[in-house]
Amino acid sequence: MLPVQWEEPLPAGADPGTVGTGGGRVTDGLRRLLDEAAIKEVHLRYCRAVDRMDWDLLRSCYHPEAVDDHGSFVGGVEEFVAWLARMLPLLASTTHFTANQLVEVDGDRAWMESYTRAYHRIAATAEAPAADYVLNLRYVDQLERRDGRWRVLERVVVHDSERFDPVAGAPVEPGANGRPGARDRTDPSYRRPLP
């Protein structure tokens, strides 16, 4: 991945189109690639935040006044976080895979469409086996760069298709065949520095 530092603001008075990692001038083509990489990273952080139920990371993907339209939920960032904090623990796990991403940048504003397949594992009950609720989604985002950081200003989630897949066979405990993941900051992916 390109060395984009999304957490570090630009130096005071710096023009985002002229500052490079070594302090040199960035060409328009390179600026476009750096912007696209930073914008795509916003969506990847969003997917990780949802799958790990990391509410601070989720908030970092949005501007404070952003609006998220998930269809069954439409509202502001804090309401969205509260909604997910109620809904996601009802599931055994979630996994979001991002595929095609189309980005258009116009100065400090951008549009992005991200194709995503989202798996929502529903735990087995006495009445039903475990199932995966699988959605083919498109996240259509309006983003804005402020203080050198790209964040979502408006998001609409488009549901292209969905299905329920029963999970066949005896249930396998998470981690039975490898290191288990966690839906919080104890997950191995949070370990830094890497070994």
Image (cartoon, rainbow, N blue to C red):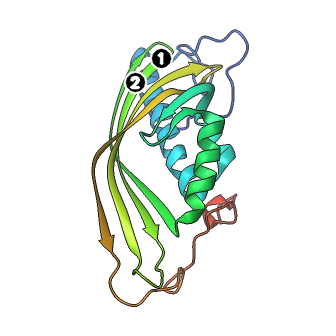
- Asked if residue 150 shows in the view, the reply is no
Residue 86 or residue 54, whichever sits in front = 86
The residue type indicated by label 2 comes to Trp
- Asked if residue 132 shows in the view, the reply is yes
Residue for point 63% across, 67% down: 188
Residue for point 52% across, 82% down: 178
- Above or below, 43 relative to 30: below
The residue type indicated by label 1 comes to Arg
Task: Identify the image quadrant of residue 7.
Answer: top right
Residue for point 41% across, 28% down: 33
Q: Secondary structure at mark 2?
A: strand
Residue 102 or residue 82, whichever sits in front = 82
- Above or below, 13 relative to 60: above
- Please report contact status of discs 2 and 1: CB closer than 8 Å, yes or no: yes
**Is 14 placed left or right of 135 in the picture?**
right
**Is 102 placed left or right of 94 in the picture?**
left
Task: Identify the image quadrant of residue 147.
Answer: top right
Q: CA distance from mark 2 to mark 1?
A: 7 Å
Residue 54 or residue 108, whichever sits in front = 54
Would you name the residue on which mark 2 appears? 111
Q: Which mark is residue 109?
A: 1
**Is 143 placed left or right of 148 in the picture?**
left
